[in-house]
Amino acid sequence: MEDNLEDLGIRLSQLMGALRARFARDLARYGLTFPQFMALCSLEQAEGQSMRMGDLAAATYQSAASMTGIVDRLLEGGLVERRPDLTDRRSVVVALTPQGAQLLEQVRADRRHVLEQLLQSLSTEERTLFHHILGKLLRRLEADEDRE
């Protein structure tokens, strides 16, 4: 049983690593890194599709210094813009541009296609069971985090 458990842990790590590597390669085709992608997603979900730099850094688990570099590269690509903060004239907000929103749509469509191809190797019943198992494991991990 213990060998099986260790093998399962290794396989989960390999699957996560392979998925991360594939996603990083796919993002690179769009000229994005994972932190840049997360910044765009955070902006898309924010009210008015804009956020202060500090809030964006916190939402993406980046330091303020790292976020400045991330935003600078997104600015160069025309994916975001800096605007004055209407509630605090001393501050600026970062806002998603239409070009940034369109790129997110393309990345997501590509991601869906990759996942569809990957999951084609599973039957409908296996996909349903896999979804259920993943949900159960995630809920357990979240419950453990709440207790810490």
Image (cartoon, rainbow, N blue to C red):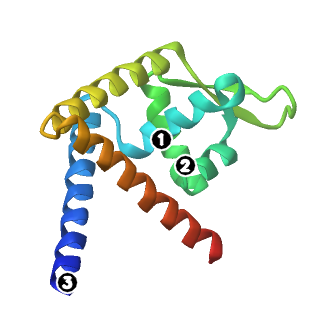
Question: What is the quadrant of residue 127 in the picture?
Answer: top left
On screen, residue 99 above or below 70? above
Earlier residue among tags 2 and 1: 1
Rounded to the nearest angstrom, the CA distance separating label 1 from label 3 is 39 Å
Local packing at callout 3 (Cα closer than 10 Å; few below 14, some 14-19, many 20+) is few
Type of the residue with mark 2: Thr
Q: Which residue is denoted by mark 1 in the rendering?
A: 38
Type of the residue with mark 1: Met
Q: From the image, which quarter does the C terminus lie in?
A: bottom right
Q: Which residue is denoted by mark 3 in the rendering?
A: 1
Earlier residue among tags 1 and 3: 3
What residue do we see at 54% from left, 47% from top? 67
Rounded to the nearest angstrom, the CA distance separating label 2 from label 1 is 6 Å
Q: Which residue is denoted by mark 2 in the rendering?
A: 60
The picture places residue 54, in percent across and down from the top left corner, at 68, 48
92 vs 43, nearest the viewer: 43
Local packing at callout 2 (Cα closer than 10 Å; few below 14, some 14-19, many 20+) is some
Type of the residue with mark 3: Met
What residue do we see at 34% from left, 26% from top? 107
The picture places residue 108, in percent across and down from the top left corner, at 36, 27
114 vs 44, nearest the viewer: 114
Looking at the rendered structure, the secondary structure element under dot 3 is: loop
Nearer to us: label 2 or label 3 = 3
Looking at the rendered structure, the secondary structure element under dot 2 is: loop
67 vs 2, left or right, is: right
Looking at the rendered structure, the secondary structure element under dot 1 is: helix
